[in-house]
Amino acid sequence: MRRALNKLDRRPKMLSRRHIDVVLMEPQKADNIGAAARAMANMGLGRLRLVRPRSLNWELMRATATSHAAWVLEQMTIHQDLGEALADYGLVVGSTARVGHRRGLFYTPRQLAPELLAESDPSPVALLFGPERMGLSTGDLRFCQKVLRIPTEDPPSSSLNLAQAVLLVGYELLVAAGGEPEAPSLKPASQKDLDGMYEDLSETLVHIGFLPADNPGHWLMNIKKIFNRSLLTGGECNLWRGLCRQLRWALENADRLPARKSGPGGPRGA
């Protein structure tokens, strides 16, 4: 059964992001650690490393991470030295909100994401995020080969919540790896379907006096423009044809229609 399902699944396989770890430098709040772990699990990233965390409230971290990301916290490692935490990575990418010519050449997550992905046997990559209050120092960035900044509306709004930053970078990696779903494709109605719908619509509108009987096609053009903007499907054309047929039947069989029920206040005008 599994082999049959795999054959039916024609979607391209996503590139792995498990070789991309997150390193949090001196995180101050346990709930931010848990939320970052949840973001990593959401986006398919690797392991989590903490460097000199200020708070390790495990109950709060687990609650914020949820059971979905419990494995991230279980595999998390804690270090006292940043150099030690980064020692076995082939590439370290630092995230910063502050600018300055000494802080490196800046990339956006979207620009950098394809470079961090690999088809096979990838080198381990670390995404380094600084403390919530101050971010990475210039000294911390010296450990990094690449520096990224997440674009924001204006400089006063450039500082993001720690977990938000992890989520946004992880999302760009997910999209670059092929994880963005394809836009739903709808098959437009055939000309035969459209002609049949317009014929029924024209007949109905003439029947109720909305269009003149001598030249309804001319006046129907404005209505066609409305439908053309929506790119109807064959099923939607059939729906409109059914509506037109029911309207004509109702006009010709008014005595057979169910009686209208009065509201709580009785018939209008009573």
Image (cartoon, rainbow, N blue to C red):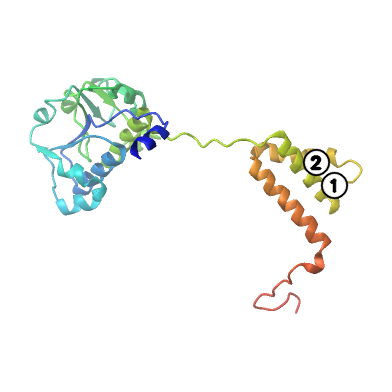
Q: Identity of the amino acid at label 1? A: Leu
The circle on residue 211 is 1
Q: Is residue 54 left or right of residue 221?
A: left
Which residue is found at the position 79% from the left and 43% from the top? 199
Q: Out of 52 and 188, give the one closest to the viewer.
A: 188
Residue 225 image-quadrant placement: top right
Residue annotated with mark 2: 220
Which residue is found at the position 72% from the left and 53% from the top? 243
Where residue 56 appears, as percent x and y from the top left, is: 13, 48
Q: Give the answer, above or below, for where 11 lies relative to 142.
A: below
Q: Out of 8 and 93, give the one closest to the viewer.
A: 8
Where residue 61 appears, as percent x and y from the top left, is: 19, 49
Q: Out of 59 and 235, give the one closest to the viewer.
A: 235
Where residue 44 appears, as percent x and y from the top left, is: 28, 36
Residue 255 image-quadrant placement: bottom right
* Residue occupying the far right of the picture: 214
The circle on residue 199 is none
Badge 1, how many Cα within 10 Å: few under 14, some, many 20+? some
Q: Identity of the amino acid at label 2? A: Leu
